[in-house]
Image (spheres, helix red, strand yellow):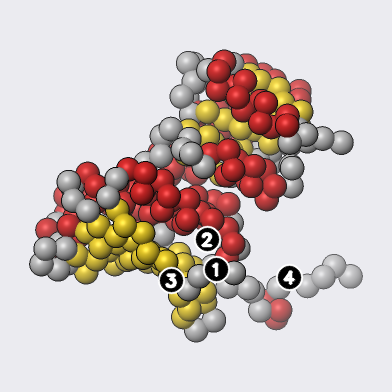
Amino acid sequence: MLPAVRSFPLRCSYDIVQARQYARETAREMGFSLTDQTRFATAVSEIARRVLDDGDEGSLRFALVVSGSRRGLECVCLGSPWRHDAAAPASRGLLSGVERLVDDFELAPGGKEGLLVLRKWLPLARPASLQAPRPV
Amino acid sequence: MAGQVLLIEDSPTQALRLRLILERDGLRVTVARDGHEGLRISPLLLPDAVVLDVNLPDLDGFQVCQALKDHPATQDTPVIMLTVKDRAADTLAGLDAGADAYIPKDDFAEINLRRTLEDMGVL
């Protein structure tokens, strides 16, 4: 049974490894494909590393999210790299790889620290009416 | 019959370690020491999965993965990249090359490799 919410502190490089593993495991249990497990876990690892590279501490909070009939996995990162200047083109350039790995990528700059939100959504099951007809 | 894995890894120590882990799980493991050897063996061996290191002495793992996916005999063979290169750009390069899974060499690498092989139906 997956917990609805789980938080990880970011204080040392091993915290990155543990958070990445949690992201991969949770995505696996939710039914994400192998490549999507890889994408989400890598995105989490990358943003966590940015927080520590900035010489600061931060935190990650994982949550299962629902939007209509969609189910997804969300990671909210609190850290100094996402404060006001995180939206600058140079910083965004460094994060473009992360943006390509997830479905939603939202920056919420703040004063000392800002928030970065990542989400990956499970593909919707195709309605029966859209599925290919069975061969006769 | 036990699944067959082709392990492309140039480090003898790493290769032996992975081979023992996979064989303990009942898999048959063939080791190739570089990219060219891996590409030569794979169409003959037709493994159930390829476990591929990125840092190889001749071709890099991305080139090997792309070549495996371009070859008619191995295009459907699952490729697992196992690597110390864990940045977003590296992962994207691996997925763009056609890798089916990309596993960083960290403390959880062995368990992730085993679970990935399970998910692929190889274990």
Quadrant occupied by the C terminus of chain B: top right
Amino acid type indicated by mark 4:
Ala
**Residue B35 seen:** no
**Chain letter of disc 2 in the image:** A
- Residue located at (68% from left, 36% from top): B49
Task: Find numbered disc 4 in the image and state the secondary structure of the residue it sits on.
Answer: loop
**Residue B108 seen:** yes
Amino acid type indicated by mark 2:
Thr
> For mark 3, what is the residue?
A5
Q: Are marks 2 and 4 in contact (CB under 8 Å)?
A: no
**Chain letter of disc 3 in the image:** A
> For mark 2, what is the residue?
A26
* Mark with earlier residue (4, 1): 1
Q: Are marks 4 and 1 in contact (CB under 8 Å)?
A: no
**Disc assigned to residue A2:** 1
Mark 4 vs mark 3: tell me if same chain: yes
Q: Where does the image place residue A119, in percent across and percent down from the top left?
A: 41, 66
* Mark with earlier residue (2, 1): 1
